[in-house]
Image (spheres, helix red, strand yellow):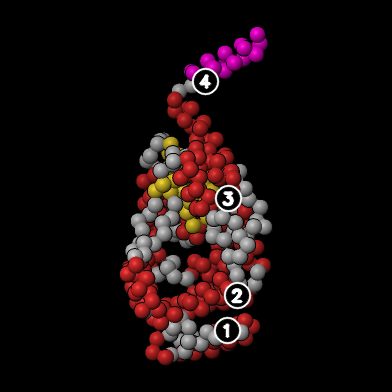
Amino acid sequence: MKTKSLFAVAAMLLGAMPAHALAAQAESEIVVSARRSGAPMWTIDTPSGTVLLVGEIRAVPKSTPWEPERLRDATAEANRVILRAAPKFSPGDVFRLIFRGGSFTKLPDGRVAADYLSSPQRARLADLEARYKVDYDRGSFLMSAFDLLARRLDFDNDTTDDATDIVEKAAKRADIPIIRPERFRGEDLLDNLAAAAPESHIACLEAAMAATEAGQPVVQARGDDWRRFDIPAVMANPLEIALGTCWPWEDEDLGGEIRDQWTRLIAEASSTNGVTLAVVPLGVLAERQGVLDQLEARGFAIAGPDWR
């Protein structure tokens, strides 16, 4: 009898709760579940719902202790998700890349690295060439930087699924609407890259050299700091600096447009009902004058780890 009475009282109390209170409780449970994943995240509470921002870094080491299944579970209960969009390349763009490949991979007009770099910069590059037995003398600074990060530092080896991959799979399985920023056309991206002067990629090369010189410890430190929610430490990590310094982020027009797209989508989501779960590159969120700064400047109250 006592058990039945308890159930009856519970049912009565739940029936007496306003609909908005029940919705708020459900939203809170989603946020709690997502936070248990261990990924850094921020919340924006509005009169109509909650926007949950997951700060993503690419290539999280497998040794970084986080629980992606918690994020997967939270996704299945969200009302919608916002995820990055892949560029839209056409068959024609592929042919353009093939026929113009030299303009992307080599320095122009037979010039060499020393024609652009200072003596100390060229000496650092020479040290790395000798260490890894490679020749970057004629290579595009952007391609040389990518080679240093991906093949010499090998930062994306032995990693877990990115948060975007986890959320995308869970959203499709649960039939949750997926919203994405406007996709960039491959033609526009290739034209932007082809028009960039070699000098515009020197900062990227310098950052990639610094990360590669620091070695594998910076890869693990980046994952550990991300898991500890030490956002300033992640942003100061040589690998994160390199990834955020290279194209397209260093391009003022292209990088600025990407950042504006994210800010606009999140601001729009704040006026919708229920929970919006957005997976956003941490560099875009936490950089100076990044998405979090822009949202705060618009008057949004943001709860979560310190990002500056």
User: Which span of residues is magenta-colored?
Assistant: 1-16
The residue at the point 41 percent across, 59 percent down is 86
Sort mark 1 into few (<14), some (14-19) or many (20+) by Cα contacts within 10 Å: few
Q: Using the numbered discs, state the Cα–Cα distance from disc 3 to disc 2 in whole angstroms.
A: 27 Å
Using the image, tell me which numbered label, if any, was put on residue 39.
3
Query: What secondary structure is marked by label 1?
Result: loop
Q: Position of residue 105 (x, y in %)?
A: 44, 80
Q: Earlier in the sequence, mark 1 or mark 3?
A: 3
Q: Is residue 287 left or right of residue 67?
A: left
Q: Earlier in the sequence, mark 4 or mark 3?
A: 4
Residue topped by disc 4 = 14
Left or right position of 154 against 18: right
Q: Residue at x 67, y 67 (%)?
A: 217
Residue ID for mark 1: 134
Location of residue 58 in the rendering, given as x and y in whole percent from the top left corner: 54, 60
Could you tell me if residue 236 is visible in this image? no
Against 46, residue 133 (above or below) is: below
Q: Amino acid at mark 4?
A: Leu
